[in-house]
Amino acid sequence: MNLYQLFKSSFMEPKKRAAVRIMPIGRILKFVFLFITLLSILSFIEFQLGIGSSSSDLEGLLQFIEEIDWLLYPFALVFLFVSTTLYHFIKISVFAAFGYGFLVLLKRRGEYRHMWRTTALAVTVPTIAAYVASFWVNSLWVSFITSLWTLFLLYSAARFYPKAPPAKKTR
């Protein structure tokens, strides 16, 4: 699957989200870093547009920001990318642990690393929805709802993992 197909399957196909468990980790990481880069760029643009509108009342602050643009913007972009990367990888890892619990609960065969790959796709749509919703609503409810949505996507993908073989009886 190419990156566009991964993005498309992250939106609507739980069977393909489950199928990425057998893909190379490099392709999944490329998808994750591309997604993080896009989020960082959008957030940076929002940051740039927000500075002028929120500080227009304070002439001294606006003048100070204009004087250190050469330092502020590159540092902000790097810091934003690093913090977004850290946050996104932690989020994927925590949800992958819940997804692994779904595999155990559903008696499906899979490992944490498989569920991590599936989770990398499952968090895409709720993350986009949370980003868009942040323009109108600034609440913990958005995070709670998108977390439940991610768990639902993981559960629906975990159902398509292969069934675990029956346990051997020991005498």
Image (cartoon, grey):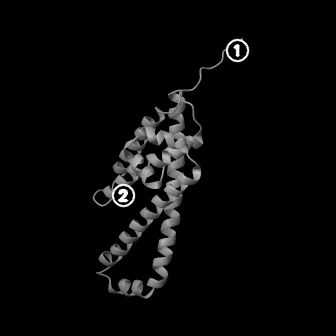
User: What residue sits right under mark 2 in the picture?
Assistant: 131
Contact (Cβ within 8 Å) of mark 2 with mark 1: no
Q: Position of residue 70 (x, y in %)?
A: 47, 84
Is residue 108 rendered to the left or right of residue 62? right
Q: Amino acid at mark 1?
A: Thr
Q: Quadrant of the C terminus?
A: top right
Q: Which residue is rendered at x = 32% and y = 82% of the image?
A: 58
Q: Secondary structure at mark 2?
A: helix
Residue in front for this viewpoint, 81 or 22? 22
Q: Position of residue 156 (x, y in %)?
A: 42, 35
In the image, residue 112 sits, relative to residue 24, either above or below, namely: above
In front of the other: label 2 or label 1? Answer: 1
In the image, residue 112 sits, relative to residue 42, either above or below, namely: above
Q: Amino acid at mark 2?
A: Tyr
Is residue 2 rendered to the left or right of residue 142? right
Is residue 53 rendered to the left or right of residue 79? left
Tell me which numbered mark, 2 or 1, is placed earlier along the sequence. Answer: 2
The residues bearing labels 2 and 1 have C-alpha atoms spaced at a distance of 52 Å
Q: Position of residue 61 (x, y in %)?
A: 37, 83
The single residue placed furthest to the right in the displayed view is 171
The single residue placed furthest to the front in the displayed view is 1
Is disc 2 surrounded by few (<14), some (14 to 19) or many (20+) residues within 10 Å?
Answer: some
Q: Secondary structure at mark 1?
A: loop
In the image, residue 171 sits, relative to residue 127, either above or below, namely: above
Is disc 1 surrounded by few (<14), some (14 to 19) or many (20+) residues within 10 Å?
Answer: few
Q: Which residue is rendered at x = 45% and y = 37% of the image?
A: 157
User: What residue sits right under mark 1 in the picture?
Assistant: 170
Report the number of numbered marks: 2
